[in-house]
Amino acid sequence: MTHTPVLLTPGPLTTSARTRQAMMLDWGSWDREFNTLTANLCQQLLSIVNGHASHHCVPLQGSGTFAVEAAIGTLVPRDGKVLVLVNGAYGQRLARICQVLGRAFTTFETAEDQPTTAADVQRLIRADASITHVALIHCETSTGILNPLAQIAQVVADHGKRLIIDAMSSFGALPIDAAQVPFDALIAASGKCLEGVPGMGFVFTDKAALAGAEGNSPSLALDLHDQHAYMARTGQWRFTPPTHVVAALHEALLQYHEQGGLAARHQRYASNCNSLLDGMAAIGLRSFLPAAIQAPIIVTFHAPRDPRYQFADFYERVKAKGFILYPGKLTQVETFRVGCIGCVGPHEMRAAVQAVADALREMEVLHI
């Protein structure tokens, strides 16, 4: 390929030229200007979640999973117990994190096309008094399903439990207000709906919960209490920061606000999703989820039921036409996924549908 492909994946994703350009400057990790950039970035992130009064924003090197592990290890005490709500691969990964960290946990698993309900959570908490924390994937990226965060958060709070939210694929595009939705931790990352590049996670932590978390973490590098305390005292990251990633995210946030913030970002992604769904339906490809629980982040499609269809061949043919898709992550049915996020609009989504149609015709799977 001689051109840059469009990434229709849930991160890494297609970024703007301005965001890529921001990585052309090298920064000193202890430099005052870089420390100011980090502090400003955290303030902007807190504004998106309306969390200045109640939460700290603690940035962390690494992918989003690093930040999820840091949140569990730091905020769940060693004698705590986590109820992990699972309806996809990322809920399963969160449970695995609890297991590796030695935190007691129990899982509640629903089908991959079935959201967890607030009634489920209420019943489970009432049945097990030892539960201290509930962990929820807001938008489960393995299918694109949206779980009912506000209702679940209210039940958790009503029972005096603590909520940890993996908002990796929703933060910045779907509204979450810390003044309305009580949580101990909300976790996201640079390379998702904010349209930065991968390499930095961040955790919005309740101020009181973080203050009481000293000594909880079994890790040095993933200790959010220590990370926050050091940054508050010195203005610096404890260990070498991802300087170019921070600079790119700062630039991406400038564009985020120029373009109209969360409401505009949500609207563009919703338009992308609608264009994609309409176009794929027109060529006979069915989405896995019903519209009512489909988040405008990533869409899972049933693979064609034809022996000539092989995902690896399909993927390479679509890539040759300029688009990178995502494999399916379901265990029961064969699927593939198409992301709606990134620096793309409905025009790119329609072009992607055309590329899919052309690839399937070449494979003699589609005959329209």
Image: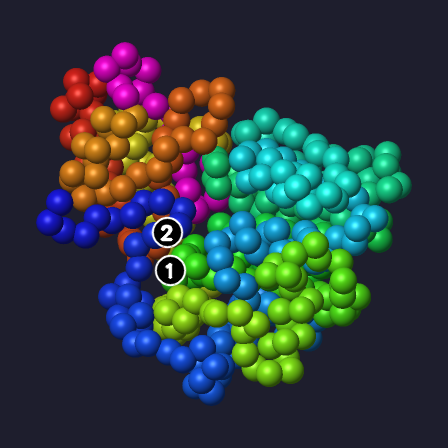
Decide: is 349 above or below 213: above
Q: Position of residue 38 (x, y in %)?
A: 49, 76
Q: Residue furthest toward the right?
A: 129
What residue lies at 76% left-to-right and 48% top-to-bottom? 133
Q: Position of residue 347 (x, y in %)?
A: 23, 50
- How many discs appear? 2
Decide: is 40 above or below 312: below
C-beta proximity under 8 Å, tags 2 and 1: yes
Q: What residue type is labelled 1?
A: Val
What residue lies at 45% left-to-right and 31% top-to-bottom? 329
Mark 2 or mark 1: which comes first in sequence? 2
The image's mark for residue 248 is: none
Q: Is the magenta stretch mostly helix, strand or loop?
A: loop
Label 1 sits on a secondary structure element that is loop
Q: What residue type is labelled 2?
A: Pro
Q: Where is residue 220 in the image (x, y as percent from the top left)?
A: 64, 61
Residue 27 left/right relative to 137: left
The image's mark for residue 12 is: 2
Report the span colored magenta: 291-310
Task: Quadrant for the N terminus, please.
Answer: top left
Of residues 350 and 133, which is closer to you in this image?
A: 133
Q: Can residue 97 be seen in this view?
A: yes
Q: Examine the structure image and report whether residue 9 is included in the region drawn in magenta.
A: no
Q: Disc 1 marks which residue?
A: 197
What residue lies at 29% left-to-right and 48% top-to-bottom? 7
